Image (cartoon, rainbow, N blue to C red):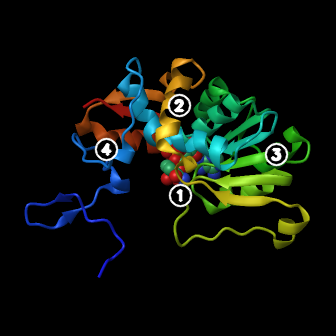
Amino acid sequence: MRSGRPTPSLRFDDGRGCTAFAGLGSFAEELLVHERAVVKIRDEMPLDRAALIGCGVTTGLGAVMRTAAVPAGSSVVVIGCGGIGLSAVQGARIVGATPIIAVDLVASKLETARTLGATHTVHASETDPVAAVHEITGGGADYSFEAIGLSATAEQAWAMIGIGGTATVIGMLPMTSQVTIPGGEIILSEKKLQGSLMGGNRFRLDMPKFIDLYLDGRLKLDEMVSATIGLDEVNDGYAAMKAGKTLRSVIAF
Ligand SMILES: NC(=O)c1ccc[n+]([C@@H]2O[C@H](COP(=O)([O-])OP(=O)(O)OC[C@H]3O[C@@H](n4cnc5c(N)ncnc54)[C@H](O)[C@@H]3O)[C@@H](O)[C@H]2O)c1
């Protein structure tokens, strides 16, 4: 009987199938991938910058450009300024959104958000972020993006948008979590809540487009790399990112 799962292309020595995360695998020095996961990019693109686009940048840019399809002139708020949220901030700048409000708990992340396109920043441990966004936008943002993965901030994303607004959750909420929104607002305010998986990307179209944006100077990747590390330092790289000390570390194989 067919299980619906593809047959693993890799096997352990004892014959058991070995599936690769997301069909790719992570931190492997050699990969076996489907042809749809391969695309030719411009020769002048440095690979230690292209590496950032593979997940985080594509997710943040795609959430803005594809999932929400934010039109120029819209007001945007991004909650969480890690690699994903800052890519959403950049996406908002590239499509011509204004104002672009970045929310985080770490001052250095907010400073980086300014350099990448945020017009306003809100330090969420010092200010009520929902009230601040309503004040800056005069009644709520057109689009909000949650880039953390918490129920509380997903609920803030809903509360930050105004009438007709759209809240997009990018952060990976735990499977058992619940997000509570006021039922009456769904109809009376025509607000929308949606999720975005990998920015709804179409890899073979989007990857070359994002490379063009970097080489044209519109997508800033150099600013997102805090350190270059070896594969044996991968756990330290994660610890530094979780502690808010780094934005992204690139592994040089
Ligand atoms: N939807 C997808 O396809 C997809 C793809 C990749 C990653 N993700 C998810 O996106 C989320 C963000 O990933 P990341 O790599 O940018 O994480 P990160 O840890 O680098 O960034 C999270 C940011 O949120 C800030 N933060 C934490 N709590 C906050 C709060 N209460 N208010 C405001 N800011 C707060 C942190 O200071 C940090 O800057 C994760 O949940 C990740 O799993 C989703």
Instruction: Provide the secondary structure element on which disc 4 rests.
Output: helix
**Image quarter for residue 194?**
bottom right
Question: Crowding at label 4, few (<14), some or many (≥20) Cα neighbours within 10 Å?
Answer: few
Q: Tell me the residue at 24%/62% (across/down).
A: 8
Residue 78 to residue 153: above or below: above
Q: Are marks 3 and 4 in contact (CB under 8 Å)?
A: no
- What residue would you read off at disc 4? 235
Instruction: Provide the secondary structure element on which disc 2 rests.
Output: helix
Tell me the mark number nearer the camera, choosing from 4 and 1: 1
Question: The residue under label 1 is which amino acid type?
Answer: Met
Tell me the mark number nearer the camera, choosing from 4 and 2: 2
Asked whether residue 11 is in view, the answer is yes
Q: Earlier in the sequence, mark 1 or mark 3?
A: 3
- What residue would you read off at disc 2? 210
Q: Earlier in the sequence, mark 1 or mark 2?
A: 1
Q: Quadrant of the C terminus?
A: top left
Tell me the mark number nearer the camera, choosing from 3 and 4: 3
Q: Tell me the residue at 85%/38% (across/down).
A: 136
Judged from this view, the residue extending furthest toward the left is: 13
- What residue would you read off at disc 1? 172
Q: Earlier in the sequence, mark 3 or mark 4?
A: 3
Q: Quadrant of the N terminus?
A: bottom left
Give the alpha-carbon distance from disc 2 to disc 3, as whole Å.
Answer: 26 Å
Q: Earlier in the sequence, mark 2 or mark 3?
A: 3
Question: Crowding at label 2, few (<14), some or many (≥20) Cα neighbours within 10 Å?
Answer: some
Between 221 and 209, which is closer to the camera in this rendering? 209
Q: Tell me the residue at 74%/35% (across/down).
A: 100
Question: The residue under label 4 is which amino acid type?
Answer: Asn
Give the alpha-carbon distance from disc 1 to disc 2, as whole Å.
Answer: 23 Å
Q: Earlier in the sequence, mark 4 or mark 2?
A: 2
